[in-house]
Amino acid sequence: MKIRTRRARIALASTVVLPLVLAACGGGDGDDGGNGGGGTANEEIELTLAHSYTDQQPQHRCGAQVIADEVAAADVGLTVDIFGASQLGADADRISAVVAGDHDMDIQGASALGAVHEPIGVVDAAYAFDDAAHLSEFFGGDASTELRDEFASSTGVQILGAWSAGARHFTANKPIREPGDLDGLRMRFPNSPQFLMNAEALGATPTEVAFEELYLALQQGIVDGQENPLTNIVAQNFAEVQDYISLSGHQQNSNLVIIGPVWDEMSEEQQEALSAAVDAAVEQVPQCVEEDEATTLDEFSSGGVIEVVDDVDVDAFREQAEEYFSENYTGEQLAVYEAIREAAE
């Protein structure tokens, strides 16, 4: 799919409008209508917002779509066009595109963003956050200011907000109740430095499989199990090829809403409207996730497709993970981890 970028549209408009403006204004000495943002007051801007989720998942329904709807209702010259289901490429490709300004906004997991700023990957550390509220409050408060500022300074990309898309749990063909139950299992983890650290922290042996190929890998026994939030487990029908889901809740699946260089070209009013729209989504997504998860667990428990293991020794996993990260993080990564844990206390 060929997307005409926002910059190209503005450039084309400028070639048409600029001669008319020069003829009409003649270089007068009035003020510049300063607005706090980089652009002129409420210049029409069309933003692209990409993500990797289906239209049925709460990350889209209650996240991306809410952002687009709230921005439209604000009527400040902004439009948000959504491209879901990885239409604009895989995570790594889209991160690079946002940094370069080739598309404007994205919804990304912190571990994926670690490719452009390593310390932010710590947000996806196993048991770093106690629950979804802890994650939202961390990014909505002063505790994350240094991390957000350093990310923006390093990449030119702003973090507008963050939510949890649900806790990640293990599925396998045997119950996983304690760290020792992972011994000998080939568990699929995403191939990023932070997820591989999570595997080691939890006592798992990670196996690399592309997400798009995971269903077939589970069906054929190439891997014994995997870990994902319930929304992804349902969307990919993993219950069809796994016998047990063990509610370890070992990681809050982070979604960060990011925006690239176009942020500095928006008026202050547009920036405020977009920030408010993201805030609305940050409030709504966890509620939608919670409702979807409750429905899913009811269906799993009553349908017999997959057995729900709800007596996982979470404390044992948590203590093992905390010890691992305290010993293996250094420098900026350790500082981020400690800031997250201190925010919980």
Image: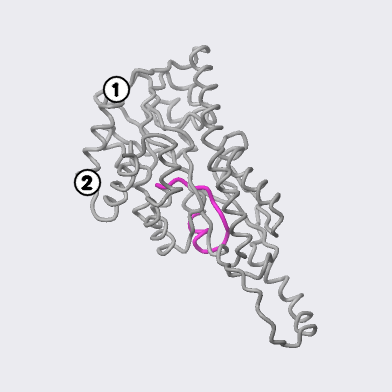
* Horizontal side of residue 330 vs 100, given as left or right: left
Q: Residues within 10 Å of mark 1 (few under 14, many from 20)?
A: some
Q: Residue at x 47, y 36 (%)?
A: 213
Contact, mark 2 vs mark 1 (Cβ under 8 Å): no
Q: Is residue 83 above or below residue 78?
A: above
Q: Is residue 28 above or below residue 281?
A: below
Is tag 2's residue or tag 1's residue first in the polypeptide sequence? Answer: 1
SS at mark 2? helix
Q: Quadrant of residue 319?
A: top left
Q: Residue at x 32, y 30 (%)?
A: 186
> Magenta residues?
95-111
Residue type at tag 2: Asn
Q: Position of residue 305 (x, y in %)?
A: 50, 15
Residue position for label 1: 313
89 or 312, which lies in front? Answer: 312
SS at mark 1? loop
The stretch drawn in magenta includes residue 103? yes
4 or 178, which lies in front? Answer: 178
* Horizontal side of residue 79 vs 210, given as left or right: right
Q: Residues within 10 Å of mark 2 (few under 14, many from 20)?
A: few
Q: CA distance from mark 2 to mark 1?
A: 23 Å
Please tell me how many numbered marks the rendered image carries. Answer: 2
Q: The C terminus lies in which quarter of the figure? A: top left
Q: Is residue 315 above or below residue 277?
A: above
Q: Quadrant of residue 78?
A: bottom right
Q: Position of residue 93 (x, y in %)?
A: 50, 54
Residue position for label 2: 328
Q: Which mark is residue 152?
A: none
